[in-house]
Amino acid sequence: MATEINSTTASGMRLAIVLAGNRNAGKSALLNRLTGQEVSIVSERAGTTTDAVAKAFELPQAGAVCFYDTAGLDDDEGKLGGQRVCATQKVLRRADVVLLVIGRGGVTPEDMRLIAKLERRHAQFIPVFNFCDEYEPDEYNRGLLKTYGGVEVSAKTGAGIDLLRQKLEEKLKLFINDKPLIADLIRPGETVVLVAPVDSEAPKGRLITPQVQVLREALDANAVAVVTRDADMQKTLGKLAAKPALVITDSQAVKQVAATLPDDVPLTTFSILFARHKGDFKLQLDGANAIDQLRDGDKILIAEGCSHHISCDDIGRVKIPNILLNHTGKKLEFVWTSGYDFPQELSGYALVLLCGGCMLNRGEIRQRIEMCREAGVAVTNYGMVIAKGVGVLSRLKGLKGKI
């Protein structure tokens, strides 16, 4: 049985489960049945769910997850209905697993379009044939049920729910420890040095999320974690009895750290660790090297994962554009998005830059990368483009074999 989790669990660390389907397919009732709580309003009236409803939970075999109930895929009547469908599509990008809830009428054209889209993007999904207490799927729907490993359930009576939970947790296990942050790069007892500059964007009184997550995983791996500032890097190394097994720095200090660190000590950045943890490392490395092919007038999309106060030395709005302009010597055009906003049409861009993604879950990051791949647009992330721009990307490739 699922249990509620502490709401302070970072959203970027939760696996996302999105319930999608047409109006009156029983998505809200199914969510309530899965969680054992009245999370969503249930009504026979079509279109009751208008905005996505999120519920944080913990599943025994998968850990922290977040369920999302969504508006109907067929809720496209008028301007407001179209906006609801767009909102549903945006939530679907976050999904690690999609529960495609199919109602009394069986599979619809909207369902099949979503299945085709999910298959094209290599997304995990489970067709859920609801209302099994009222009707049996016909031969066509049974064929789809078998082809895609679907489940017959009744959100009303609870029939089939245990089997659905089992299949859901099997899908989610594919993501658990799929790519850790550093646990596979270090051994128990080894020393890891984390370089954490304190700049104008660092939150007062605490470390930023990537630093906290990497530090926690280092401790879980029984490593010795040492945290220092970039200005104290040499002093810190001098106090260690042996060379560290790994040094991890904030991207903005990577040039200074690389200059003071012996060549035989492996070096990487928090952002690059997140690139392999949540995304496609090789594709993003290729994207960083594609910077050398940029031309005058090329348009660059910089996709920030969180909304924040924009400072005079903001990394995404100021520092990275300046690095690209200085490195390429070209006249480039920059476009920014933040949070979950991300354009559906990418063909006009020469390059997409993703942030580290600490506030976005893996489903969102991977879907963005797949969209770039489909559009034939180079994609990389902040850490890689900074390392490329300041001339130390090749220095960081010491970890490439492991990454």
Image: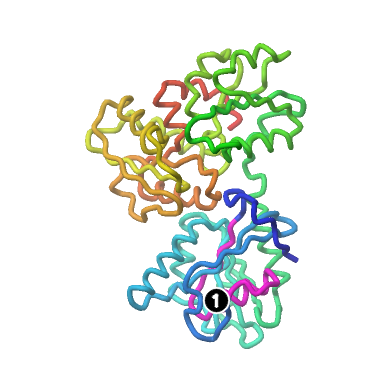
At which x and y percent is residue 208? 57, 38
Secondary structure beneath label 1: strand
Give the residue at the far front of this rendering. 204
Q: How is the image coloured?
A: rainbow
Answer with left or right where residue 330 lies relative to residue 218.
Answer: left
Q: How many marks?
A: 1
At which x and y percent is residue 3? 73, 63
At which x and y percent is residue 127? 57, 69
Asked if one can make out residue 287 in the rendered structure from this viewpoint, the answer is: no
Answer with left or right where residue 4 lies relative to residue 29.
Answer: right
Above or below, 198 against 129 in this view is: above
Name the residue nearer the viewer: 236 or 125: 236
Q: Which residue is mark 1?
A: 102
Q: Where is the C terminus found, in terms of image quarters? A: top right
- Type of the residue with mark 1: Ile
Read off the magenta span. Answer: 16-40
The magenta stretch spans residue 24: yes
Answer with left or right where residue 168 lies relative to residue 377.
Answer: right
The magenta stretch spans residue 67: no
Q: Quadrant of residue 29?
A: bottom right
Name the residue nearer the viewer: 263 or 217: 217
Q: Residue at x 55, y 76 (%)?
A: 102
Above or below, 151 against 215 in this view is: below
Asked if one can make out residue 387 in the rendered structure from this viewpoint, the answer is: yes
Q: Residue at x 33, y 30 (%)?
A: 322
At which x and y percent is residue 164? 68, 69
Q: Where is the N terminus found, in terms of image quarters? A: bottom right
Q: Residue at x 56, y 35 (%)?
A: 273
